[in-house]
Amino acid sequence: MTPNPPRSENLTGILMMLAAMAFFAVEDLFLKWAASDLPIGQIVLISGALGAPVFVVMAWARGYGVFMKDALHPAVLTRNCGEMIGTASFMAALAMVPLGTVAAVLQAMPLAVTMGAALIFGERVGWRRWTAIGIGFAGVLLVIQPGAVGFRPEAMLVLVTVFGMSVRDLVARAIPARIITPQVSAWGLMSIAVLGAGMMALSGEARMVTGTEALILTGAVLFGTAGYWAVTTATRTGEVAVVAPFRYSRLVFSMGLGVVFLAERPNGLTLAGAALIVASGLYAFARERARKRASQAG
């Protein structure tokens, strides 16, 4: 990709990002439907077991193995731990919390990653972006509404998801360049399958999957894989600074699906909190883009 892609490439990247977020929102809807009947551990196991082979084949197609020593690299193992924490809490949240609420809190993840990069890796974050992070997490409180009459403690699970996924994304920076994305994805999904098996063993909950449930889980895997392909294409086609802000469209898609298919009705505080999260995230993106331009000009 050229340093300054033409407008047509940026437009393609934006459209692919929008498609990816729509696919991920549909995947979440399918998973929520599945979680209403099936044990969480069983869903986690099936999701990992069905998704991992896709990326194993992708790695093999590029001439890379999967069952190798690099799978035990400390950064890979730490990333897998973050993946497992995020996945388990995400599935539990989907089973108990409105889809729109889950999607709204998840939008705080880029802010959490920025904060983690500053605190852990010492990356420079100015007061404006720190302010945006603070406002974003204030928006999270509005969405979760702790202390309110309708407060649902299980909504805190989404914050655990944000923590786990942020660890996953931050640690990914320490994975050696010789390890390609399909390998990392395959190992992550394998770890999720192992986690699901462990959850089933501890809970003792498992049952035969009906034909309808099998179709729902297959749909989740297909839309999730399509989303992964689309988001990868988006970031490799257009400028990241131009394309990345469109990740927030996932919130619109998720809330829309929740209203249409789940009869969810987000209240005013939830909508206000979601708006704060998105606005602060977009501002943080803009500040980062301005900082990079200034450093390049200097």
Image (cartoon, rainbow, N blue to C red):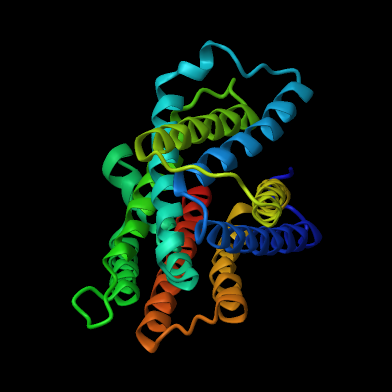
Q: Which x, y percent locates residue 246?
A: 60, 65
Most extreme residue toward the bottom is 268
In the visual, does 180 lie left or right of 161?
right
Q: Which x, y percent locates residue 96?
A: 40, 64
Most extreme residue toward the top is 69
Q: Residue at x 45, y 39 (%)?
A: 83
Q: Nearer the viewer, residue 38 or 19?
A: 38
Is 56 rendered above or below residue 221? above
Q: Nearer the viewer, residue 66 or 157?
A: 157
Is 138 rendered above or below residue 219? below
Is 214 rendered above or below residue 153? above
The quarter in which the N terminus is drawn is: top right
Q: Residue at x 31, y 77 (%)?
A: 142
Residue 33: quadrant of the picture: bottom right
Do we see residue 85 in this rendering? yes
Residue 59: quadrant of the picture: top right
Q: Which x, y percent locates residue 82?
A: 39, 39
Q: Nearer the viewer, residue 167 or 150?
A: 150
Q: Residue at x 71, y 62 (%)?
A: 19
Q: Nearer the viewer, residue 139 or 72?
A: 72
